[in-house]
Amino acid sequence: MPRITVVTTVTTTFDVPEGVTITQVRHLALQDLNEMDELTNSVSDYQDRAINRVYHGAADGIRLSVEHAISEGVQPLNPA
């Protein structure tokens, strides 16, 4: 059976005050981002629903991965 991958990317850029290093931001904020199980499940459910609409319910999700990153500067919205 062929496999396809669905990628949903959410990128948010913030203007923040001076005084906190990127290392401190990562240390403090990544913990909270990793606790987003309910929202992750919601995105996964939407992806599953969309693909199964195309395949009339015959598609089986086999893998889900979540990545959180906090970086300095403005990142491109579509890096590809």
Image: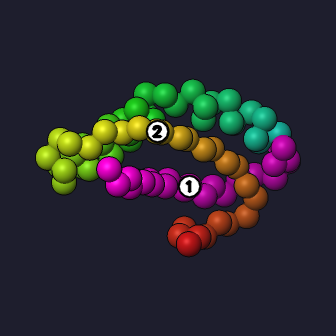
Q: Which residues are magenta?
A: 1-23
Q: Residue at x 49, y 28 (%)?
A: 37
* Direction front: furthest residue: 1
Q: Earlier in the sequence, mark 1 or mark 2?
A: 1
Q: Secondary structure at mark 1?
A: loop
Q: Is residue 22 magenta?
A: yes
Would you call the spot at circle 1 few (<14 residues within 10 Å), some (14-19), or many (20 or more)? few
- Check if residue 68 falls in the magenta segment: no
Residue at horizontal 32 percent and vertical 50 percent from the top: 1
Query: Does residue 34 appear to the left or right of 72 in the view shown?
Result: left
- Quadrant of res 26: top right
The answer to which image quadrant residue 58 occupies is: top left
Q: Secondary structure at mark 2?
A: loop
Give me the C-alpha separation between circle 1 and circle 2. Answer: 25 Å
What number is the disc on residue 63?
A: 2
Q: Are marks 1 and 2 in contact (CB under 8 Å)?
A: no
Q: Nearer the viewer, mark 1 or mark 2?
A: 2
Q: In the depicted view, which residue is nearer to us: 44 or 21?
A: 44
Q: Picture coordinates of residue 66 (x, y %)?
A: 55, 41
Amino acid type at mark 2: Arg
Identify the residue at image location x=68%, y=30%: 31
From the top left corner, tell me how far across and down residue 53 is, in percent. Answer: 17, 49
Mark number, residue 3: none
User: Can you tell which quarter of the image residue 54 is in?
Assistant: bottom left
Q: To which residue does mark 1 refer? A: 12
- Relative side of 47 to 35, left or right: left
Front residue of this view, candidates 21 and 8: 8
The C terminus lies in quadrant = bottom right
Kind of residue at disc 1: Thr
x, y percent for residue 50: 25, 49
How crowded is the residue under tag 2: few (<14 C-alpha within 10 Å), some, or many (20+)?
few
